[in-house]
Image (spheres, helix red, strand yellow):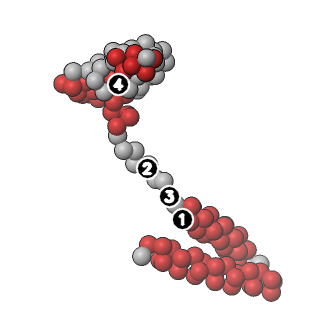
Amino acid sequence: MEDQNQLNTPFVNQGDLLPVGANKRTRILRVVCNEREKELLFAKARAAGLSLSAFLRAAAMDCKVVMKNQLPPEVLLLTARVAGCASSLNQLAKFNNQHIQFTPDEIISLFTMIEELRQVSNEIKNYLR
C-alpha cells in the first residue's frame, strides 16, 4: 500500500524525480556574470517557461562538461621531466657564461640530460600520433 501512495504523490514538475517537499531547496548560490549574460539567462529561462533557478539547475544537470586544459597524466609527467631538464640546463649555461670550466661529472650530466630530452621528445611525438 505504501508503494502505491508513493506512485500517486504529486511531483513538483514533469521533469522532477522527487515528490513535492521531499527535497526542499534551501541552498543559495551566487553567480557572477555581466549585464548581457544576465539578460540572456533570464530570456532563456523565460522562453523555457522556467524560473532562473530551475533553468540553471536544468542546464547544469543536463549539460556535458568539457574540462578545459585537462591534460592526461602522461603529458603532465613529460612536462615535469622537460621542466627539470630545462632547469638543469639553465644552471649549466650559467656556469658556461661565467667561464667556469665543466667538471667531467657535469659533462656526463649534460650528455645525460640531452639524451633524456631526446627520449621525452620521442615520447611526445609517439603520444601525439
In this view, the residue farthest toward the left is 47
Q: Is the residue marked by circle 1 packed among few (<14), some (14-19), or many (20+) residues within 10 Å?
A: few
Residue contact between numbered discs 4 and 2, judged by CB atoms under 8 Å? no
Is mark 3 in CB contact (under 8 Å) with mark 4? Answer: no
x and y percent of residue 71 in the render?
50, 58
Dots 1, 2 in contact, CB < 8 A = no
Q: Residue at x 64, y 83 (%)?
A: 115
Name the N-terminal-most of marks 4 and 1: 4
Picture layout, residue 77 above or below residue 98: above
Residue 83 shows in the view = no
Quadrant location of the N terminus in the rendered image: top left
Question: Mark 4 sits on what residue?
Answer: 16
Q: Earlier in the sequence, mark 4 or mark 2?
A: 4
* Residue denoted by label 3: 71
Q: Are marks 3 and 1 in contact (CB under 8 Å)?
A: yes
Q: Quadrant of residue 116?
A: bottom right
Residue 68 is marked as 2
Crowd rating for badge 4 (residues with CA inside 10 Å; few <14, some 14–19, many 20+): few
Q: Which of 98 and 53 lies nearest the eye of the viewer?
A: 53
Distance between mark 2 and mark 3 Cα atoms: 9 Å
Residue reaching furthest top? 21
User: Which is more toward the observer, 5 or 43?
Assistant: 5
Residue type, label 2: Lys
Q: Earlier in the sequence, mark 1 or mark 2?
A: 2
Residue under circle 1? 75
Q: Which mark is residue 128?
A: none
